Structures are given as structure tokens and as C-alpha cells.
């Protein structure tokens, strides 16, 4: 596929900045759109002379049509990334995940109705809620998310499906497992590292430690997104993007303690909410990735290797 002009919302964030790197390496012209609420300029500083950077907000921008008018494709990665805030703050996910997605789709409808760009959306495994079938396939239902984050992502998926059908937008949706790697600013590895640096003799672990989930390294995640987006034929498609295996929280604690040379530290479990870390936390998650494999893609690192690689990257930086 030849070089394209690609808009990446949230392109200064964790996953977005790695996506920008991959798209540039393929010779594309990239526009990064980010309000820097969770993204960081340092994540894209090494490519600043090779991109167009727009410091704007999808909710507040009154000239969003300008950003999409020349794009061949839009990767919509911008979102509130923190699942845990939902109990105390029910609005942020609505604003940053639903309203932001609507505004972007509406800008495409208004100025690109006759030639809409392709559209790729980063969703989440949390749309499945406490799934009773594992590994969970894409056609599992009914979807009953238990977090504000998962609910907002599912609502955004529905908007994209409707806009795709009504306005001819070719759209791809990816439901991620837990993504880990360099530039990550939140999540279990970041939390454990922070806690152990503050107090190396004791590690507090949210929940009962039996929570078990799948993890994918950001490099595999980004490669999978680009591969499936470029090979997709239907006008609307969604994929699970993760790994076949899973690791429990207690095991992740051991990986971090070993990696930091702190095997003597005590592990203290909080019990959490019904054994999970917090209200809205899905305790067990494992995704079927057969559909992604059918496109010719597969991951290079399983969950444990993804975690170990990401830990090394985070400790080095």
C-alpha cells in the first residue's frame, strides 16, 4: 500500500505514539492530534520534524473539519485511558470517549461525505464485562460492561457502526487486551514499579491476586492494527487484539519483584471489590484471537514475555 496522509488522534499518548512511529516507518505523512491531557510531547519529540502536530481537543475544537479534510485514513486512539476513575467520575469517559468520537465522525460526515477517509478505532476488552465464555470471541453477547470506561467504548463502537452504514465510512474496531510497553503511563506494571520505588520492602496489590488477564506488547498491538486495517474488506469489522494466554496478578507481582531485585519484599493483598482490584475491574479476561489470525497476523510475544519485555523497557526509561 502506497504512502498516505494519516490523522492519528491521541498520537502523543502511549499506544498512539508507537502507532505514529510505525506509520512513519512505512513512509506515510502523519498528522498527530492531541490535547496532551495524557499524551506527552516527549513521546513524539524524535519525530516532530517529520509530522504535523495539532495541539487540540476533540471535544472543544470548532474547526475539526480542517484536521480531517485531507486525511486518507483516521486512527482514532484519543480517549480517557484510566478505567479506575469511573466510580468517582462518571462524566469524563462520556465526554472523552463518546462525545469526542461523535465529534470526529460528524466532522467526517460534514466535510468528507462523498469521499470519507478510512476509520480505525481503539476499543477495549472491557466491553465484554464479566464474560462467561473464555477465550471470548467477537460475537459474544449480550455485551454488559461493568465500568464507565467499557460502557463508553461500547457506545463509541455503536456510533461508528451507524456512521459506517449511513455514510459509507469504512471502519475497523479493535478490542484490546491489556497493552504494555515503553511509554506506558498507567496500568499494573507502572503501579507496581511506583509503589516499590516508594517502599521497596512492601508491595500492596489491589484485589486478591487471582485476577487473570491477557497482555499484549504495544509493538505487537500496533503491527496488528495496521495489518488488519490494511487487509480488511468489509465496510465495518471488529477484532479482538491480544494473546492466547494470560497471567494472574500474583504472578505479575513476582515478575516485577524479580525484575527489580526485590524478591524479599512482602506482598499485601487488599481484597479489593469481589476479589477484583476496584469497582468496574473485570477479574478474568481472555480473548479469542482466531479472527485476527485469519488475516495472516499473529503476535510475537505471549502475555508473560510481553510483561517481562515491558518491565525491562519501563525500568530502563
Image (cartoon, rainbow, N blue to C red):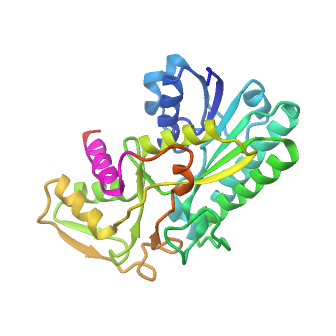
User: Measuring 52% from the left and 57% from the top, which residue is drawn there?
Assistant: 290
Relative to 296, residue 242 above or below: below
Tell me, yes or no, whether the highlighted magenta stretch contains residue 314. yes
Residue 117: image location, x then y, percent: 75, 33
Which contiguous range is marked in magenta?
Answer: 300-315
- Farthest-out residue, left: 264
Question: Which corner quadrant of the image does residue 142 belong to?
Answer: bottom right
User: Measuring 87% from the left and 36% from the top, which residue is drawn there?
Assistant: 110
Asked whether, in this view, residue 86 is left or right of residue 96, the answer is left
User: Measuring 16% from the left and 65% from the top, which residue is drawn there?
Assistant: 201
- Farthest-out residue, top: 49
Residue 103: image location, x then y, percent: 77, 44
Asked whether, in this view, residue 246 is left or right of residue 154, the answer is left
Residue situated in front as seen by the camera: 186 or 302: 302
Question: Which corner quadrant of the image does residue 120 belong to?
Answer: top right
Tell me, yes or no, whether the highlighted magenta stretch contains residue 293. no
Amino acid at each position: 500500500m502506497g504512502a498516505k496522509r494519516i490523522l492519528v488522534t491521541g498520537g502523543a499518548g502511549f499506544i498512539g505514539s508507537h502507532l505514529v512511529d510505525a506509520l512513519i516507518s512505512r513512509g506515510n505523512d502523519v498528522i498527530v492530534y492531541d490535547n496532551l491531557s495524557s499524551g506527552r510531547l516527549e513521546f513524539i519529540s524524535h519525530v516532530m520534524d517529520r509530522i504535523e502536530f495539532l495541539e487540540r481537543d476533540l471535544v472543544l475544537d470548532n474547526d475539526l473539519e480542517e484536521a480531517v479534510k485531507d486525511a486518507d485514513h483516521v486512527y482514532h486512539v484519543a480517549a480517557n485511558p484510566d478505567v479506575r476513575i469511573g466510580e468517582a467520575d462518571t462524566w469524563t469517559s462520556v465526554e472523552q470517549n463518546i462525545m469526542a468520537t461523535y465529534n470526529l465522525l460528524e466532522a467526517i460526515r460534514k466535510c468528507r461525505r462523498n469521499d470519507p477517509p478510512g476509520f480505525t478505532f481503539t476499543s477495549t476488552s472491557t466491553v465484554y464485562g464479566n464474560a462467561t465464555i473464555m477465550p471470548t470471541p467477537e460475537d459474544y453477547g449480550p455485551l454488559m460492561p461493568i465500568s464507565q470506561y467499557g460502557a463508553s467504548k461500547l457506545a463509541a463502537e455503536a456510533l461508528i457502526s451507524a456512521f459506517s452504514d449511513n455514510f459509507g465510512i469504512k471502519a475497523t474496531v479493535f478490542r484490546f487486551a491489556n497493552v504494555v510497553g515503553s511509554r506506558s503511563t498507567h496500568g499494573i506494571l507502572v503501579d507496581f514499579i511506583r509503589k516499590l520505588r516508594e517502599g521497596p520492602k512492601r508491595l500492596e496489590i489491589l484485589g486478591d491476586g487471582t485476577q487473570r488477564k491477557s497482555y499484549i506488547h504495544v509493538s505487537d498491538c500496533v503491527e496488528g492494527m495496521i495489518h488488519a486495517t490494511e487487509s480488511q474488506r468489509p465496510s465495518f469489522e471488529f477484532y479482538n487484539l491480544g494473546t492466547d494466554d494470560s497471567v494472574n496478578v500474583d504472578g505479575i507481582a513476582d515478575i516485577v519483584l524479580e525484575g527489580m531485585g526485590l524478591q524479599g519484599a512482602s506482598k499485601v493483598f487488599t481484597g479489593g471489590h469481589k476479589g477484583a482490584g476496584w469497582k468496574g475491574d473485570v477479574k478474568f479476561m481472555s480473548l479469542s484471537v482466531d479472527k485476527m489470525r485469519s488475516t495472516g497476523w499473529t503476535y510475537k510475544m505471549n502475555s508473560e514475555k510481553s510483561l517481562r519485555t515491558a518491565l525491562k523497557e519501563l525500568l530502563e526509561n
